[in-house]
Amino acid sequence: MAEPGEDEIKRTLEARAPLRIEPGDLKIAAVLVPIFQKDGQWQVLLTRRTQKVEHHKGEISFPGGHRDPEDADLVSTALREAEEEVGLCSADVRVLGRLDDISTITGFRIRPFVGVIPYPFDARPAPAEIAEIFTLPLVRFFAPDNFIRREFKKDGKPYPVYYFDIDGYNVWGATAKIMVQFLTLVMDFKEPSK
């Protein structure tokens, strides 16, 4: 599979108007989808949350969190959280664009931003929040045996929930939904038929 270059990813993200969800009663949050190239392949950096955090204990996630009052905008939130959670210096991230807002059943509106990060970098997990920092090649998300889609009902409407099981890491929920959108946009991901 031919992987797109950084400029192509940026053009793809900039060429569309991402979906905006008005927060209403939802808590406002932002995440960084941190990608980098290693041995000519795109990789994504993910975290496993500790059991000490308030929400999504032990789950796989992107660096991110609540918007603080001092954050200038949501991209600032994503970059600040990435620095706090994994030690990624904001000045070292090249933000390529953003994806659609998503809402979660736990009451958040998340705005994802895609950014290229340096490789390697000195990862420093925040002990209270991050149990593990790891990376996965994007190509691994395309293996049919690694992907599951389940349909649930939310307010009487079908609600898809995605799961990726890769090398013992179960990526699901909002993180998997963001990955599906990113991969569909930039690498022509298609849900495998089973």
Image (spheres, rainbow, N blue to C red):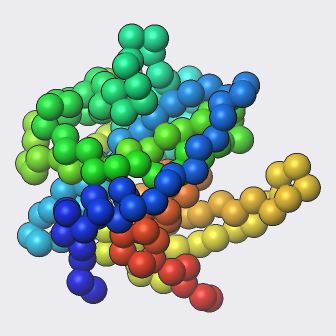
Placement of the N terminus among the 4 image quadrants: bottom left
Q: Residue 107: horizontal and vertical position, in percent?
A: 68, 32
Q: Residue at x 19, y 56 (%)?
A: 36
Q: Is residue 52 visible?
A: no
Q: Nearest the camera: 177 or 5?
A: 5
Q: Residue lying farthest top?
A: 70
**Up-down: is 11 above or below 75?**
below
Q: Residue at x 35, y 65 (%)?
A: 12
Answer with left or right where residue 25 lies relative to residue 42.
right
Q: Quadrant of residue 109?
A: top right
Q: Is residue 151 visible?
A: yes
Circle count: 0
Q: Residue 170: horizontal and vertical position, in percent?
A: 48, 58
Answer with left or right where residue 183 lies relative to residue 90.
right
Q: Residue at x 56, y 64 (%)?
A: 163
**Up-down: is 57 above or below 166?**
above
Q: Residue 52: horizontal and vertical position, in percent?
A: 48, 23
Q: Nearest the camera: 106 or 49?
A: 106
Q: Quadrant of residue 40?
A: bottom left
Placement of the C terminus among the 4 image quadrants: bottom right
Q: Residue at x 83, y 52 (%)?
A: 154
Answer with left or right where residue 149 lies relative to residue 1.
right
